């Protein structure tokens, strides 16, 4: 049996995001600040989602890396 996803743990790990689970069970994360058009052109996304917690975490890590590179 897999460990249940604790949203508070995800939120603590990614404080720049608001994370929730929809009524369909999909996990969503949206940034706590608005992106500029230039940032979005660099591959940053305002909101990401996935059905799998591990995939969502990978997306969030990738987005955080892109944000760090963008400055």
Image (cartoon, helix red, strand yellow):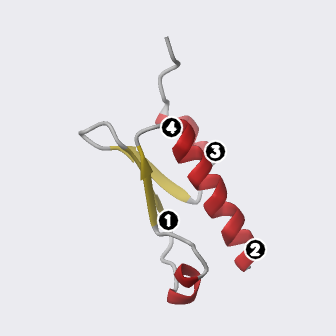
Element marked by disc 3? helix
Estimate the spatial distance between the alpha carbons at disc 2 and disc 3, rounded to whole Å: 19 Å
Q: Residues within 10 Å of mark 3 (few under 14, many from 20)?
A: few
Picture disc at residue 24:
none
Element marked by disc 2? helix
Q: Residue at x 52, y 46 (%)?
A: 56
Residue 37 visible here: yes
Estimate the spatial distance between the alpha carbons at disc 4 and disc 2, rounded to whole Å: 24 Å
Residue 11 visible here: no
- The x, y position of residue 55, in whole percent, is 54, 43
Element marked by disc 1? loop
- The x, y position of residue 42, in whole percent, is 61, 80
- The x, y position of residue 44, in whole percent, is 56, 72
- The x, y position of residue 53, in whole percent, is 50, 37
Picture disc at residue 69:
2
Question: Could you tell me how many numbered marks the image carries?
Answer: 4
Q: Residue at x 75, y 74 (%)?
A: 69
């Amino acid at each position: 049996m897999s460990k249940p996803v604790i949203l508070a743990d995800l939120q603590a790990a990614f404080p720049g995001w608001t994370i929730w689970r929809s009524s369909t069970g999909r996990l969503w994360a949206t940034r706590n600040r608005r992106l500029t058009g230039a940032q979005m052109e660099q591959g940053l996304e305002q909101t990401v989602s996935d059905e799998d917690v591990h995939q969502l975490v990978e997306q969030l890590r990738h987005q955080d890396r892109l944000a760090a590179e963008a400055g």
